[in-house]
Amino acid sequence: MIFNRIKKALTCENMDKKELDLLGVNDLDIQAEEIGIGGEFSKERSKEAYRIRMQKRKEIQKKRLELRKSKKGLVIVFTGNGKGKTTAALGMALRMLGHGHNVAIIQFIKGGWNPGEQKALKVFGDNLKWHSIGEGFTWETQDKERDKYFVKLAWEKSLSYITSKDFKLVILDELNIALKLGYISTEEVINGLSKKPINNHIVITGRGATKELITIADLVTEMNLIHHPFKEQGIKAQEGIEF
C-alpha cells in the first residue's frame, strides 16, 4: 500500500520534489512505527529474527535521516500546567552554550530572581545575557499598570535580541503569562518573531499559550500535570527543584 501511494504520487505532474520527499518521509515514519524499537517485549522468538527486524529498522531510520535535509531557526513553545517548562528551555540554553553560541534569556513577570540556573550559567560569561524584568506575580505587585510597564520593557529588551544575528537562541520565559494577562498582544509578539534571523531559535514558555502562537510555532510541547507536591502534600518550593 505504501509503495503504491509513492508510485501514484510520482505520476502527478503538479507535485514538486519537496512534496514528494515529504510524502516519502511520512511513509517511512509509518514503517518505523510499525517495526517499533524492539526491546524485551518484542514478539520474535529467536535472536536472528530479532536481529533481522532491527536491521530493517536501522535501514529505514537511515533513509528518514537522509530525506530530512533542511535546517532553519525554530519557534518553540513549552506550555501546559505541568512543571518543567522553564527547565526544558534552560536545558536548550545549556546545550547551545556548550556549542559556543550566544544565548539571551528574558524573564517576564517573575521579577528579580536569582535562580540556581543563573548562578551556574555565569561560567559562560558574555555568551549568556540574562534579564529578569518585573516585580513578581500579580498577587505580589497588585498594580496592573506597573506590571504592564515592565512587560513592555521586557518585550523591548527581547526584540533587541530577537532581531540580532549574534544570539543563536533567545528564551522568552513566561511570555505566555504576559499574553494571558493581556499585557501584550499575540499579534505584536508574532510580528516581532517574524523579524528574527532565519537560522536563530526562539523559545517561549508559560502556561496557556494562545492558539495563534501555537499555530505559528514549529515545535510545541505541553507539560501535563499528574502529581504536584505543593498541591497534594503541602510541600513548598525547594532549592534546586523550583529555583
Image (tube, rainbow, N blue to C red):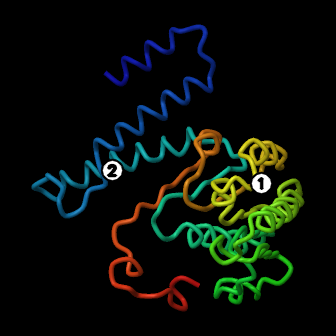
Percent across and percent down for residue 117 are 65, 83
Q: Secondary structure at mark 2?
A: helix
Query: Would residue 121 be found to the left or right of residue 102 on screen?
Result: left
Query: Mark 1 belongs to which amino acid?
Result: Asn
Select label 2 or label 1 by which is in front.
Answer: 1
Q: Secondary structure at mark 1?
A: loop
Q: What residue is shown at x 75% (from left), y 77% (from top)? A: 135
Percent across and percent down for residue 85 are 55, 66
Q: Relative to 41, is 111 above or below?
A: below
Query: Mark 2 belongs to which amino acid?
Result: Gln
Percent across and percent down for residue 71 are 69, 46
Quarter placement of the N terminus = top left
Percent across and percent down for residue 101 are 78, 68
How many numbered marks does the figure carry? 2
Query: Would residue 153 be found to the left or right of residue 91 on screen?
Result: right
Per the image, the residue denoted by label 2 is: 55
